[in-house]
Amino acid sequence: MTRHEALKHILAPLSDGDLTLFTTGMISREAFNIRDRAENFYMIGSMGLLNALGLGLALQAPARKVWVIEGDGSALMSLGTLPLIATFRAHNLIHIVLDNEAYESTGGQPTISAEVDLAALAEAAGYERVWRVSDPASLQKALREAVDTTSLTFIRVKVSGRAPEGLGRVSLTPEQIKQRFAQALTQA
Amino acid sequence: MRTAHEFWDILKSEGVTFFAGVPCSLLEGVINVGSADPTVTYIPAVREDVALGIASAAHLAGRRGGVLMQNSGLGNVVNGLTSFNLIYRIPVLMVVSWRGYGGKDAPEHLIMGEKTPDLLQTLGIPHAVLEADTLEEHLRWAVSTMEQHQIPVAVILRQSIVA
């Protein structure tokens, strides 16, 4: 399964009001092109900061689902935040790592996630439900159960393939991303 | 010298009650009193940039957030400030303790102690050094400035100002 396919599976069934946060690089660009919505927050810089923002949002908006969707490079950069999220039992947070074992945006240099089991790290950190998936059917099952459960969930999705050719950048300014996201969060 | 209770009373009156941070001995009283206050949220973050990311969520939810940190942690928040808060215009109140002030401290604090105001200046973060007799004025200035400009603002806390 390519990352693009995985993102389509993740984005298609989202409920209105679900907050979705995307990490810097190709994941934000692909999500923007697949299904842009006001509740999408594209973190265009600050690699490694997304899951901390996700924890803050899960605490600030306990009635919302908060989806943190990042890559293996981003997750590896901020491993300390995993036990912090688990400690605060942010049950409305769903943490997804799209693991292609590479820093794709900078030329595909390998990360260490081919050797390091990010799902095992999430288990050790205290996530209550941890999925290791690599095909569409298991991803869809994991997503359905993540939405239904109150157990803090981490889904590691092994993905392959490069982003589609000619994929456009996020055409919103950072301020526009913030303003419409904050509006969607506070006025609903 | 002012009390940590007075410090929090000012922040609560300004609606800044969602905090994350990394401790400093100079912030011991502030963190202990804030943690014990049911109207204040304090998340013990694992790094200062993580604290910044958590606290930033308050603004997105229409509220006000802050970080508590030692000035040594400024090095850890530079990227978050420049490629997140400053470009998305997400205000956060940064309460930064000042180790190494006046060149009298343990060696690991001396360089950042000397550079702390200059570093904030370079980053374009408005800042003020808190004094006991101007505590209200400076904290209210910090909150109004961060809301007006929609960027983080720092208040710097030396030893023996708030305990």
Image: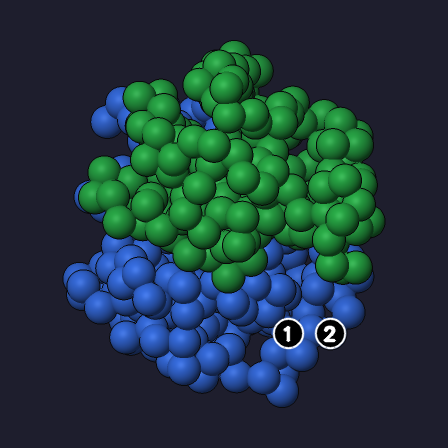
Residue B140 shown left or right of residue B107 in the figure: left
Which one is nearer the viewer's eye here, B115 or B83? B115
Please identify the quarter of the rendering in which residue A155 is found: bottom left
Q: Quadrant of the C terminus of chain B?
A: top left
Q: Amino acid at mark 2?
A: Pro
Read off the residue under disc 1: A101
In the structure shown, which secondary structural element does the residue marked by tag 1 occupy? loop
Chain B color in figure: green
The residue located at (62%, 64%) in the rendering is A77
Callout 1: chain: A
- Discs 1, 2 touching: Cβ within 8 Å: yes
Q: Is residue A20 visible?
A: no
Residue B43 shown left or right of residue B92 in the figure: left
List the single residue furthest toward the bottom. Answer: A115
Callout 2: chain: A
Q: What number is the disc on residue A110?
A: 2
Q: What number is the disc on residue A1?
A: none
Q: Position of residue A137 (x, y in %)?
A: 34, 73
Which one is nearer the viewer's eye here, B89 or A66? B89
Q: Image height check: is A163 above or below A157?
A: above
Q: Position of residue A35 (x, y in %)?
A: 44, 41
Chain A color in figure: blue
Q: Amino acid at mark 1?
A: Glu
The residue located at (74%, 59%) in the rendering is B106
Q: Is residue B149 visible?
A: yes
The residue located at (54%, 53%) in the rendering is B24
